[in-house]
Amino acid sequence: MQQHKRPPASILFIFGGSGDLNYRKLTPALYNLFLDEWMPDRFAIVGIGRTEYSDEKYRGHLQEGLDKFSRRKAEDSHYGEFFQHVNYLQLDAGDIASYQRIADYVCKKEEEWGVHPNVIFYLAVAPQLVPSIAQELGTLNLCKEKNTTRIVIEKPFGHDLESAHELNDLLTGLFAEEQIFRIDHYLGKETVQNILALRFANALFEPVWNRHYIDHIQITAAESVGLEGRGGYYEHSGALRDMVQNHILQLMCMVAMEAPVSFEANEIRNKKVDVLNAIRPLKKEDVHEYAVRGQYGAGWMKGKQVTGYREEKGVNPQSNTETYAAVKFFVDNWRWQGVPFYVRTGKFMHQKSTHITIQFKEAPTFAFPAEAAESWRNNRLTISIQPEMDIRIRFQAKRPGQTMSLDPVNMTFTYENSDDHTPEAYETLLLDVMEGDATLFMRADQVESAWKVIMPILETWENRQPVDFPNYVPDSWGPEDADALIARDGHSWINLPPEKK
């Protein structure tokens, strides 16, 4: 096993410890960190919830989750060793007095270990519970310790700009900004992090990463599933809030940001905020020219009949919530002036695919014979985030033979060929929290700047009822208006080939 420096002693309190996020993602991530010897030498994981569990029963419940969702299975001895560090604390988040039990647990571990540990509060709970839990935690003396106590907040972070601002005010009144880790699991994905390495560690790319050489950029986050029982949540969210405001705008920041002078957390985040602040504000009267919304109807998905959005459980039969959104953005700065960024996301799309496409401008063809230009294609760089994780460069090459005929060919780097196990996003992010590295986490101004970008679209859509919903069928690439949005500029959406089986 590779030797590496481990984080300092840590206690992770997981509110919502009996919930689905911990069962599917958090505990499997912590378990894989343990297998890879990234967990601290001294650590404790405490699940907090209202469900009644003994420690033994709770561990058995989480082991079932490991068997189903961990990227690696292991011997029973590994399970046993890992679960020695796992306990359960039954606690009603609304009972103020019971929070002292958390402080008592920390004191007990401090005496046992002989060192003051990092204390991490992970709020894997419904958004409406976050303010009250944060307020009660803020009364504990240990939360004043800026260097060792941290709080992790899951998305959605607010419902709009006003609520996000209110939540930021609440949190920063209780904790220092450096203690607050606003998590977006997309930023923990290997291929997302690789964007920075690709751009700034290679002299090949940065000189042409601008308006002089790039024609346009596309970001697609397509899902091949529907609501999966989340109708109640999604009805109050929609595609624009659920995906564009956080995941997609963060990917856009990674692609468009200026070169940092260091990889220090605030330096990276400053560059991302610069991008968000440079996005051209949309006037409400112009939203229809730059944004398209859609909602799926009933139909067939991979041979199975599926119901329309308005027939889903928990959804208003006359709902105007969008399950698809496409937007054309411009970043008004020196590097990107005039380069359109097309983004799209949707439910029940033809295939699951999250990818970024950098389309370069056409090279001059006049030096080549006419037959060489028949298969001419622009150079293209594609960063595929899921389900496949790879980076592809498309360039022109001469076809073997006696004539000057050209073909587009792809050069591909794929993580499948890597000897190392690729960690899940939550593994990377949880390790960063324990180490106190906030580079991949949202800062307060980032969150609010992202909301400012989409608020004109949200407000316009909420005040202008669509007349054509539902307007796309499952197993398609969305509504026709989305094709028209990009076609007006002489472009078309780029879809990756289906995943290899």
Image: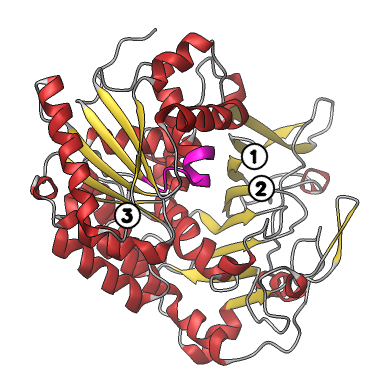
Residue assigned mark 1? 387
User: Up-down: is 39 above or below 391?
Assistant: above
Q: Residue at x 71, y 59 (%)?
A: 226
Which circle's residue, 3 or 2, is located before the other in the chain?
2
For numbered disc 3, what is the local secondary structure?
A: loop
Q: Quadrant of residue 165?
A: bottom left
Residue type, label 1: Pro
Image coordinates of residue 209 in percent, x first then y, are 44, 49
Disc marking residue 344:
none
Q: What amino acid is found at the position of numbered circle 2 in the picture?
A: Ser
Disc 2 is placed on an element classified as strand
Residue under label 2? 353
On the image, the x and y values in percent for residue 501 come to 79, 30
Q: Residues within 10 Å of mark 2 (few under 14, many from 20)?
A: many
- Tell me what residue is drawn at x 40 percent, y 45 percent: 207
Q: Is 242 part of what is drawn in magenta?
A: no
Q: Is residue 72 above or below residue 28?
A: above
Contact between marks 3 and 2 (CB within 8 A): the answer is: no
Q: Earlier in the sequence, mark 3 or mark 1?
A: 1
Q: Is 296 displayed left or right of 135 in the figure?
A: right
Q: In this rendering, is residue 422 above or below 443?
A: above
Quarter holding residue 287: bottom right
